[in-house]
């Protein structure tokens, strides 16, 4: 429980003349669910991108399990333990649900893939759609397929960029419950970028607030609420970002 | 009908054109290429109307060979574009895939896609026009190999542009081959080009491939020096294109475009 799984040191990303991320430092222990909060454009997605090795940092290091993700030799083996979900990316629409999961399962080298897919479909109520084209599904169903894809490799680290954005409350709650169970039962590490304060309060045991590419505060949810003398996380967030 | 609404819709597209050099180039590109290509073809037939005894066989064989090149390049580009259109692009790059694995998988799948398209056309040539590509003998395999390597090279260069500049580079995917058609001497011999263009054309493997195809079809002579020249040039271009793809991937990571591919 105490081993550090993510370590970010002096991380900087500069695009042309502005800093998207400026001198980020944090460590995450295995089993932590960290909420990454901040206004639009504060550098949350850029941070996730650097953790995934999708964006090259201007300087600084991202260590996953003690290994630098920028090292090409480490990158592939580290990505086998990570997965990502975002409302801004989709799975191929013309492939069926089962075909999509087969493709990504093979890409991640999942063993007993058919059983794994069958379990995921059952747990995420996707069995009845397995032969339907992904593009024909509703946004709630598509979101569940994306979550199935993100869990197909049983990732040690799950990066979630606004996982319930644009979902109705019922589907949103279903996804949150599933993620909560997945993290707690299997001691998985989750980094959740979200604007939904209720979601963050429910899922996360730690929160990191960002503004203009920098960490402006971090701690447990209760410690931040107490520190800033507010009633809940939303009021605390508003106070911090408006200061 | 309100003018201001129509104007608004028009300037939405004009803004897009104004802000994108590849889009402006695309508008100018097609008419220019068509005029150059058909200008040379017309000039050739005006000057040497008795050149071919077997005009239909030579033209059709060259057309099929050129189509094979076109399809192998477009197939490579299409596989990449499909990921952008379906917004699946980022999923691929967060998966544990090496760049070398992406290139190999696309190259192999593009070949399969090309063969599905071209085999029926080759089979139809014989009953419809009495022309068989197989009369070119074993050299045909080497010509196809050369064309496939060059098609993949162009595919790699276009996808490098897509990686680096995003979907604005998409039109280049469709038009890259037409730029080379006039210089590649697909339907006429190298000698028809002005001398200064001949120097440029000799830098392309296409010239050697199509000169050789005509040599086999018209004179029944296989000139292996042409085939070797094409293969050597192809290997140089193919290796360079792989290096450019790696550079584009690195550039895209620096620019952050792998996580946000859009208009």
Image (tube, coloured by chain):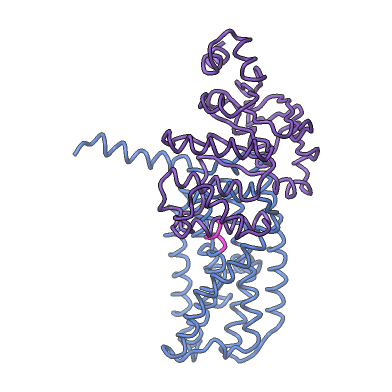
Q: Residue furthest right?
A: A66
Q: In the depicted view, which residue is nearer to us: A222 or A90? A: A222
Q: Residue at x 69, y 37 (%)?
A: A187
- Asked if residue A214 shows in the view, the reply is yes
Q: In the depicted view, which residue is nearer to us: B46 or B26? A: B26
Against A32, residue B178 (above or below) is below
Q: Image quadrant of residue B216?
A: bottom right
Q: Residue at x 56, y 56 (%)?
A: A118
The answer to whether residue B102 is magenta is no
Q: Chain B: give its colour.
A: blue
Q: Residue at x 27, y 39 (%)?
A: B6
Report the quarter where the C terminus of chain A lies. Answer: top right
Left or right of B166, for residue A167? left
- Asked if residue B241 shows in the view, the reply is no
Left or right of A114, for residue B60? left
Left or right of B156, for residue A70? right
Q: In the depicted view, which residue is nearer to us: A217 or B131? A: A217
Against B67, residue A143 (above or below) is above
Q: In the depicted view, which residue is nearer to us: B27 or B91? A: B91
Against A21, residue A85 (above or below) is below
Q: Chain A: give its colour.
A: purple
The percent position of residue B156, horizontal first and vertical second, equals: 62, 59
Against B22, residue A7 (above or below) is above
Q: Residue furthest left?
A: B1
Total labels: the figure holds 0
The percent position of residue A170, horizontal first and vertical second, equals: 43, 36
The percent position of residue B174, horizontal first and vertical second, equals: 49, 60
Identify the magenta region: B76-80
The percent position of residue A139, horizontal first and vertical second, equals: 43, 44
Q: Residue at x 79, y 49 (%)?
A: A73
């Amino acid at each position: 429980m105490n081993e550090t799984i993510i370590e970010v040191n002096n991380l900087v990303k500069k695009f042309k003349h502005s800093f998207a991320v400026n001198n980020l430092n944090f460590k995450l222990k295995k089993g932590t669910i960290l909420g990454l909060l901040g206004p639009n454009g504060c550098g949350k997605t850029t941070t996730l991108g650097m953790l995934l090795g999708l964006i090259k940092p201007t300087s600084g290091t991202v260590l996953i399990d003690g290994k630098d993700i920028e090292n090409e030799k480490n990158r592939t083996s580290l990505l086998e333990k990570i997965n990502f979900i975002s409302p801004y990316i989709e799975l191929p629409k013309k492939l069926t649900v089962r075909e999509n999961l087969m493709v990504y399962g093979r890409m991640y080298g999942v063993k007993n893939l058919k059983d794994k897919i069958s379990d995921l479909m059952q747990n995420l109520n996707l069995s009845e759609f397995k032969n339907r084209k992904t593009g024909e599904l509703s946004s709630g169903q598509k979101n569940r397929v994306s979550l199935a894809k993100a869990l197909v490799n049983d990732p040690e680290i799950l990066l979630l960029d606004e996982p319930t954005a644009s979902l109705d409350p019922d589907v949103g709650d279903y996804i949150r419950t599933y993620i909560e169970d997945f993290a707690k039962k299997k001691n998985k590490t989750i980094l959740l970028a979200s604007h939904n304060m209720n979601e963050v309060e429910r899922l996360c045991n730690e929160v990191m607030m960002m503004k203009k590419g920098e960490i402006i505060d971090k701690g447990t949810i209760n410690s931040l609420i107490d520190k800033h003398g507010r009633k809940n996380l939303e009021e605390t967030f508003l106070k911090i970002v408006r200061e | 009908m309100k003018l201001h609404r129509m104007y608004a819709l028009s300037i939405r597209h004009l803004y897009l054109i104004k802000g994108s050099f590849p889009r402006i180039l695309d508008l100018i590109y097609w008419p220019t290429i068509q005029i150059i290509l058909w200008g040379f073809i017309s000039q050739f037939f005006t000057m040497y109307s008795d050149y071919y005894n077997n005009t239909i066989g030579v033209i059709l064989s060259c057309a099929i060979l050129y189509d094979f090149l076109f399809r192998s390049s477009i197939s490579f580009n299409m596989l990449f574009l499909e990921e952008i259109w379906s917004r699946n692009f980022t999923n691929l790059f967060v998966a544990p895939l090496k760049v070398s694995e992406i290139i190999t998988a696309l190259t192999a799948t593009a070949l399969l896609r090309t063969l599905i398209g071209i085999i029926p056309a080759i089979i139809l040539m014989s009953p419809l026009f009495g022309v068989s590509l197989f009369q070119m003998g074993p050299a045909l395999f080497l010509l196809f190999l050369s064309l496939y390597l060059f098609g993949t090279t162009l595919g790699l260069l276009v996808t490098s542009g897509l990686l680096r500049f995003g979907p604005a580079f998409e039109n280049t995917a469709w038009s890259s081959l037409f730029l080379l058609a006039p210089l590649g001497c697909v339907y006429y011999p190298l000698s028809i080009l002005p001398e200064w263009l001949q120097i440029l054309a000799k830098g392309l493997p296409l010239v050697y491939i199509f000169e050789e195809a005509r040599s086999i079809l018209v004179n029944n002579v296989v000139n292996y020096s042409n085939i070797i020249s094409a293969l050597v040039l192809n290997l140089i271009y193919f290796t360079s294109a792989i290096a450019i793809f790696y550079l584009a991937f690195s550039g895209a990571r620096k620019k952050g475009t792998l996580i946000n591919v859009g208009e």
